[in-house]
Image (spheres, helix red, strand yellow):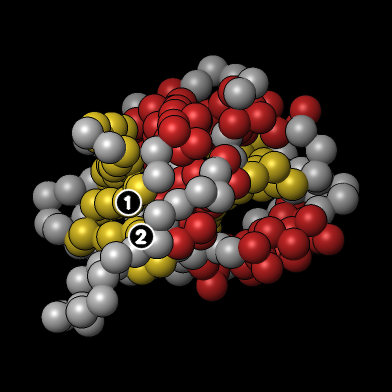
């Protein structure tokens, strides 16, 4: 598969480029980033990163990987759909309306949008949904580096959504006096509270806390390096042609 990387000059984009170059079944053919400049992903295999996708021939690309920001990702996904290029998107901040627009746009090619490409994080979300029916209270705490501009993370929102779909029997929030506004976080799907931490030194972390009479269960996942996302990205690039239309999450690609 011939791969284009959007946001190729950023930290995640550079890591994606390195992972593509390192895989014998994938070929890195182009990069796009407004901060364009020569990029050397690994082993001297240099590509020129274009400032705009207009400089890329879509016929030279099979699949595009996007780790940018929501406003840019929307345009990049439109370009992919219009040009018959498969899209693998891990950008945060996309919502149900974006998913629906993608479902309407993608026909000649396929699209995978995942809130998290770390396989451990996908399992964490699955375990939280499995546990949800057995606990009447739950909270989600997501922790990320201090350059992340959106909150809460897509992973946290998807986790709460999956838990709310698995159980509707949640005890109401007992808080009546919020001394500091926002102290209880945001009420996500099902009323499950979601808390966001932004701290220098972190990468991407999440814990789900569930409580019942006399016991608690904590499910936690930690990405200690951006390399943790790469097996999922590579898997998506290799298998996206086998998943028609728009796929949300890595679950289907992992057979979960």
Residue at the spot 34% in from the left edge and 64% down from the top edge: 173
Identify residue for label 1: 139
Q: Determine whether 191 is above or below 244 in the image.
A: below
Q: Is residue 46 visible?
A: no
Task: Out of 179 and 93, give the one closest to the viewer.
Answer: 179
Q: How many badges with numbers are in the image?
A: 2
Q: Residues within 10 Å of mark 1 (few under 14, many from 20)?
A: many
- Rendered residue at 20%/79% (across/down): 177
Q: Is residue 204 visible?
A: yes
Residue 158 x %, y %? 50, 50
The reply to whether dot 2 and dot 1 touch (C-beta < 8 Å) is yes
- Give left or right: position of 238 versus 187: right
Look at the picture and state if 55 lies above or below 125: below
The answer to which quarter of the image holds residue 112 is top right
Identify the residue at horizontal 12%, vertical 57% (top origin).
Answer: 200
Q: Is residue 202 left or right of residue 91?
A: left
- On-image quarter of the C terminus: top right
The x and y percentages for residue 37 are 39, 59
Tell me where residue 164 appears, x and y as whole percent.
53, 49
Mark with earlier residue (2, 1): 1
Which quadrant is the N terminus positioned in? top right
SS label for mark 1 = strand
Q: Residue furthest right?
A: 108
Residue 193 image label: 2
Q: Secondary structure at mark 2?
A: strand
Task: Identify the residue at image location x=20%, y=71%.
Answer: 183
- The residue closer to the viewer here, 236 or 144, is 144
């Amino acid at each position: 598969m011939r791969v284009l990387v959007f946001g190729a000059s950023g930290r995640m984009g550079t890591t994606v480029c390195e992972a593509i170059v390192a895989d014998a079944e994938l070929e890195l053919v182009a990069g796009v980033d407004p901060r364009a400049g020569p990029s050397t992903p690994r082993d001297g295999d240099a590509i020129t990163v274009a400032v705009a996708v207009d400089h890329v021939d879509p016929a030279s690309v099979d699949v595009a990987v996007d780790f940018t920001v929501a406003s840019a990702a929307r345009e990049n996904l439109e370009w992919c759909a219009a040009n018959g290029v498969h899209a693998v998107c891990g950008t945060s901040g996309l919502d149900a309306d974006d998913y629906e627009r993608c479902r309407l746009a993608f026909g000649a090619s396929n699209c995978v949008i995942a809130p998290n490409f770390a396989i451990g994080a996908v399992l964490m979300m699955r375990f939280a949904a499995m546990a949800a029916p057995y606990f009447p209270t739950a909270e989600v705490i997501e922790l990320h580096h201090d350059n992340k501009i959106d909150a809460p993370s897509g992973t946290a929102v998807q986790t709460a959504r999956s838990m709310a779909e698995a159980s509707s029997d949640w005890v109401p929030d007992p808080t009546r006096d919020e001394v500091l506004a926002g102290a209880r976080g945001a009420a996500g799907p099902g009323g499950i509270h979601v808390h966001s931490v932004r701290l220098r030194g972190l990468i991407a972390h999440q814990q789900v806390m569930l409580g019942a009479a006399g016991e608690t269960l904590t499910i936690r996942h930690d990405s200690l390096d951006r390399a943790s996302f790469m097996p999922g990205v590579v898997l998506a690039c290799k298998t996206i042609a086998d998943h028609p239309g728009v796929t949300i999450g890595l679950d289907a690609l992992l057979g979960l």
